[in-house]
Image: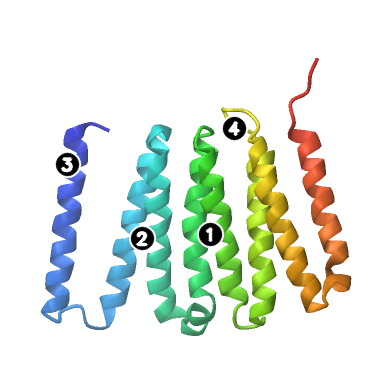
Amino acid sequence: MRRIDRSLLLGLALVGAGMLFLLQNLGFLGTLENAFWALLFGAAGIGFLAALARDRAHWWAAIPGFALLGIGMLIALGDLAPAFAETWGGALFLGMIGLGFWVVYLVCRACWWAIIPGGALFTLALIAGLSKSLAGEDLGWIFFLGLSATFGLVYLLPTNEGRMRWAIYPAAGLLVMALLMITAMGALVNLVWPMVLILAGMYLMYRTLRPRHV
């Protein structure tokens, strides 16, 4: 995108935002106020994602793009489904930001670092969604297990710099922390087989994705 095009779009966005603020302050929006703001944030998010679609070198646009879309969705759900927004709004917003980081990794394999905030935000989104139905002790081991899986993916997924072998150490340490918390809660018996399945799946992913020597 040429510099003049970017300046024009920024100017139009500022004029539009100023007009909305003016209409709001004068009381003209009325009951449509939330709908206008939802559309504004949604349109801004789509604008960033459109810039990414035109040129993958603008990988950074995925982060504000999905974040703004998440804000727009939260505002809209506050009117359309307030009960859902109250329970799952935080999880939705964190998940949308996390999705932005995962898209960064998908379009820019040199940006392997995006896996870490992407996985951490997905973990926090899961915790936010389960916080009303699970006790704090359960959320603790889920947090450590999610971070362990995140670093496990850093180790397993391909990057332009080759295998990130260092990531296996924080993955193992965080997994031990999760298992210790589960053991302290006396819930190890109920969760040992899911853990075995998770570890077996990660091992199979590693066997599939690792470089093969001819």
Q: Amino acid at mark 3?
A: Ser
| Residue that numbered label 1 is attached to | 121
Label annotation for residue 7: 3
Instruction: Please state the horizontal and vertical placement of residue 207, each as a whole percent of the image.
Output: 81, 35
| Residue that numbered label 4 is attached to | 159
Spatial CA span between label 4 and label 2: 32 Å
Residue closest to the eye, 173 or 85: 173
Q: Name the side, left or right, on which 95 lies relative to 30.
A: right
Tags 3 and 2 in contact by the CB under 8 Å rule?
no
> Which mark lies nearer to you, 4 or 3?
4
Q: Name the side, left or right, on which 200 lies relative to 1.
A: right
Tags 3 and 1 in contact by the CB under 8 Å rule?
no
| Residue that numbered label 2 is attached to | 42
Instruction: Please state the horizontal and vertical placement of residue 98, each as a whole percent of the image.
Output: 51, 56
> Which mark lies nearer to you, 3 or 1?
1
- At x 65%, y 59%, the residue is 146
Q: Amino acid at mark 2?
A: Gly
Spatial CA span between label 3 and label 2: 20 Å
Mark 4, other Cα within 10 Å: few <14 / some 14–19 / many ≥20: some
Spatial CA span between label 4 and label 1: 21 Å
Mark 1 residue element: helix
- At x 60%, y 83%, the residue is 132
The quadrant of the image that shows the C terminus is top right
The quadrant of the image that shows the N terminus is top left
Q: Name the side, left or right, on which 177 lies relative to 71.
A: right
Tags 4 and 3 in contact by the CB under 8 Å rule?
no
